[in-house]
Amino acid sequence: MVDIRAKISLTGGSDFWHTPAVTAADLPELMWTDGPHGVRKQSGSSDHVGINASEPATCFPPAVGLASSWDTELVEQVGVALGEECRALGVGVLLGPGLNIKRSPLCGRNFEYFAEDPLVAGELAAALVSGVQSQGIGTSVKHFAANNQETDRMRRDSQVDERTLREIYLRGFGKVVRKAKPWTVMCSYNKVNGTYASENHWLLTEVLRDEWGFDGVVVSDWGAVWSRVRALRAGLDLEMPANAAHEKEVRQALDAGEIDAGTIEQAYDRVEAVVRRAQASLAGAPEDFDVDGHHALARRMAEQCVVLLSNDGVLPLARETRVAVVGEFARTPRYQGAGSSRVNPTRLDNALDAISALVGHEVPFAPGFVTAAGQELADDAHERAVAVARDADVVLAFLGLGESHESEGYDRNNADLPAEQLALLEDILAVNPNVVVVLSNGASVLLPFADRVRAIVEGWLLGQAGGAVLADVVYGVVNPSGKITETIPRRLADVPSSLHFPGDVSGVRYGEGLFVGYRGYDASGIEPAFPFGHGLSYTTFGYSDLALATTDAGLAVSLTVTNTGGRSGREVVQVYVSVPGSAVVRVPRELKGFASVALEPGASARVEIAISSDDLAYWSVRDHAWVVEGGEYLVEVGASSRDLRLSGTVAVAGNEPSRPLALDSTVAEAMRVPAFAEIISGLAGAVFGEDPDLIRMMESIPLAALAGFGGQSLDEVQAMLDQVNATRSGGA
Ligand code: BGC
């Protein structure tokens, strides 16, 4: 028999990383730790901001890299490897993945998130969760919800309208919960529409559990709980880390009758279930993991993540090309983000050594600038880098953001590369126009030099094997196939959220609504530097024979992709959908499906992509429900959101609820219902005659007002509505 005090103890941590043992239940303590792209098991002093070292573990590419692969299968394999490492290190729950939407490139934590689009973020996060959990280790999908900035992250109120919240900020979480059944979900620090996520009953109970069927543990982000009593009542189960004062608060509230024993027992049961599941897979787990095998997997994964943004044909380089390598990042890679997700890698490849190994000799190198505090730099480092660059056939300039430029805990205040790097690039371009820029950064940077360099390789953050992969891409050992999941802007002011980010103490208003990322650029016709979904290859692909059909489950899209170039390569095919005649506000196009296809030169494959009705639905504010609008849908298929190769239309039946006409229905709405159309036109005709402009003006008049103009009483009109409503189904 476990007494209620022991049960209360399991609603909080016993220290920084553990849930307590419950002796009476023979329940051991369990370690929960970061996450997400590697295991950060601290054995010495603990912290949640990545300061103190942890045991060596494979550092896979962080989400920013993984996302560019669009490769759910490989991401799942990474998840499996992460699960294996958790077992070997005795970790029961890995705190990740994070799938908040990249609302602004300035968010300091974008490196840990997948995309500005909920479909691709949700699919990739679900793949990672499935992989980890296949090993009997839990995940914690975070940070739930609307946590899209670091500025004032522990307090700020994210003010998001109902439809935007559902369609953009919650949609990915819903997909992961339904598809991959994560053992735990981590609530975020911020408030969501006025209430802290940790105390938000609507979020943690009504949406997460009642609607999505989540049956696992809701754990707090570290320090996100203000009152454990209020949090438990809202649907939180576990407060992390340990907080003795809050535990006491629960005991006192129970004594005072301010919290039900049932609420505590329910949380206890859920946490206990997770601990038991993890305990079963940790018992007898091997103490080692395959260090070499996982490094090789990290490398295979990174190969899929690199994005070739531009290339005038200079890449891939021949090994004989006389190159000069400039930039400290080539020697000291930036391969993961700063903060709680920082992993202590088992190995670390750098591009400079890999390039020398590929060409068979040491290549000229100059660091040019420092990338982190504490690095030494000669006074004439800038001049030396320019001198090295002058003599080369091609200059490989490794530029990017250092750890201090982007981190958990704060946002960037501009999207520029550091000034000293931009100045160095200008001076190099003045002596040698043959420059290839290779980037390492966790979020988009502005690329004012894009038209003046011969190629740009966006390496994002690629994990511990990324350095070697960058060399492989430059020399064509690997044919790049990644595509960006965040728009790269020309100017910061072009970012749709720019007028509303990051808000102030009164809150952050998500004023751009649905028009986040490419949705906003497309709607306002703004040309980005590189659009969502963009990425080049050393080969080319042809698209043909689009076929569209409706199925019971949604839409079936199929097409043929042909490798029309001279190298084997992989294409990420994207399907965008819009509803041109929609009755509700729509963005110009939304990603609704994608697939990867690897092809030898000259080969073709039929690609089939299923789009579920859930993904076609919009959130109806009128019905407070997901609704598939009936009508003609435009389906566009292409290589990016701005490189659409095929399109077609398909009629979708829809499932709009029947909405009886009422006195506040408009004439236009009534006209869509045949039984009313006749009566209404008679009535309208009597008031307005046959003038087409007047008829158009009339469309938005509510029936009650129209009746008034026509001299009918509201009762008469209501009686007529009741009569016809009773005989019809299907709504206006
Ligand atoms: C972060 C979480 C992390 C936790 C534990 C928090 O500061 O926001 O993502 O899992 O610390 O380190």
Image (cartoon, grey):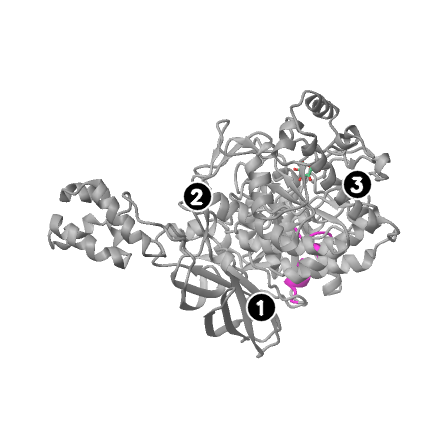
Residue at image coords 58%, 76%: 566
Please identify, in this view, whether the residue under mark 1 or under mark 3 is nearer the observer. 3
Tell me, yes or no, if residue 147 can be seen here.
no
Residue 34 point in image, percent of width and height: 73, 43
| Residue neighbourhood size for the residue with mark 1, other residues' Cα within 10 Å, grouped as few (<14), some (14–19), many (≥20) | many
| Residue neighbourhood size for the residue with mark 3, other residues' Cα within 10 Å, grouped as few (<14), some (14–19), many (≥20) | many
- The Cα atoms of the two marked residues, 3 and 2, are separated by 39 Å
Tell me the magenta residue range: 460-476
Mark 1: which secondary structure?
Answer: loop
Residue at image coords 75%, 64%: 360
Instruction: Looking at this view, name the residue that lies furthest to the bottom.
Output: 602
Q: Is residue 77 magenta?
A: no
Quadrant of residue 477 within the rendered picture: bottom right
Residue 638 point in image, percent of width and height: 48, 65
Q: Are marks 1 and 3 in contact (CB under 8 Å)?
A: no
Up the image or down, 631 lies above or below 168; here it is below
- Callout 2 amino acid: Gly
- Callout 3 amino acid: Met
- Callout 1 amino acid: Tyr
